[in-house]
Amino acid sequence: MMPASWMLLLLACCGHGNPKSVGQMLPAEPGGDFPSDVRSVFLKDKGHTDKMEVSSPVNLTLQCTWTDNKVDNITGFWRKDERDIDNSHVTLRQENQQFQLQRMFIIKDEESLGNYSCVFGNEAKVDFILTVPHMGDVRDKPVVSYVGDSVVLLCKMDDNKPKPKTWLWFRANGTDKEQIDTVTEPQKYQMKNDEKSTKLHVYNLTHDDSVLFYCSAVFAIGAAVSHLELKVITIYEPLKPFVAIVLEVLVLVTAILLFESHRSKKAQAQDASGDEVANAEAPNAEPPATTTVTTSSGESNGLDENPSARQRNVENVAQQKQ
């Protein structure tokens, strides 16, 4: 007959015991001397996203509580970046109309960051998104400066964010990034770091400096990176829009003057043509009617007179006959 201890061991190995609940889950062993932290979410709907910024290694316990009255038990498990975590599946029983799921994770480097999800069957899910602290005042527009001039590029963290251990600067080199060394190029670059901000001075600008610059806030667990675009132009480039406007005005004025000149010449040609026609028709016109008045002596005065004058002459001739 098999001893009772062996039978218990066989049952445990074959998994024929009670389903595991959240209280029976064995958490991961705490990592080193890392501090501990707990992040909890109470879920009433089907999904929720909780964002958390981590700047240093931590033993992080994630807790999910989901309320549902439809089922008495459900399978709960964990995912990391949409991939199931091994040995995380458990059968949960409803207690006080709630399902609870928790697990401790050792967050020690950038690979440990990401999206952790607690999943309740196919019914509900909570996403915990762990990232390094983000930069503040991210600039969308490029920084513009001139050839031969200098420029100051600024990156900073918000006041409520933790202080980085150090700051680094990079510049784009094709598809790669090369770190800026202010020691080997002191005449080109100068870096000034404060607790939560950094400034990069770039001198003797050329068109080759029209690239992306990257600032990196280095924390104990990883680095937060932001970028700024630098655009280097000549002093004449800002004048190009004004020159274009002036040229458009000149073209418009020239077109107007040419049109007015053409219209004036056409009008003068029409007037000259009208005068020539009038002069050609003048010899064919009938001369005006004339009246010859004969005096008593029978001589004509050869003058053209109007009717009133002729009437006076007739009266004068009648008086002389009397």
Image: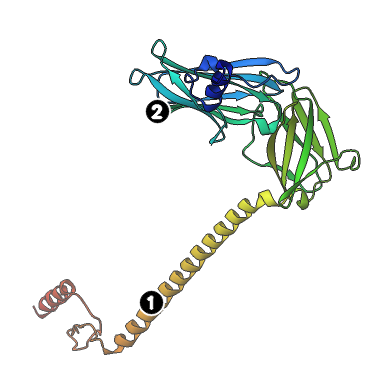
Other residues around mark 2 within 10 Å, as few (<14) / some (14–19) / many (≥20): few
Observer able to see residue 161 = no
Q: Residue 302, position in %: x, y?
A: 25, 85
Q: Is residue 187 above or below residue 43?
A: below
Quadrant that contains the C terminus: bottom left
Point 33% across, 20% down: residue = 70
Other residues around mark 1 within 10 Å, as few (<14) / some (14–19) / many (≥20): few
Point 76% across, 44% down: residue = 171
Point 64% across, 22% down: residue = 28
Point 41% across, 24% down: residue = 74
CA–CA distance in space, label 2 to label 1 = 92 Å
User: Which residue position is annotated with label 1?
Assistant: 270
User: What is the three-letter code of the residue carrying label 2?
Assistant: Glu
Residue in front for this viewpoint, 36 or 186: 36
User: Which residue position is annotated with label 2?
Assistant: 123
User: What is the three-letter code of the residue carrying label 1?
Assistant: Gln
Q: Secondary structure at mark 1?
A: helix
Residue in front for this viewpoint, 77 or 250: 77
Q: Residue 214, position in %: x, y?
A: 73, 39
- What is the tally of numbered marks visible in this picture? 2
Quadrant assignment, res 218: top right
Task: Identify the disc placed on residue 169.
Answer: none
Which tag, 2 or 1, sits closer to the chain's start? 2
Q: Is residue 215 above or below residue 58?
A: below
Observer able to see residue 165 = yes
Q: Residue most toward the front?
A: 1
Residue 73 is left or right of residue 103, and the answer is left
Q: Residue 172, position in %: x, y?
A: 74, 47
Residue in front for this viewpoint, 266 or 134: 134
Quadrant assignment, res 106: top right
Q: Residue most toward the left?
A: 322
Q: Secondary structure at mark 2?
A: loop
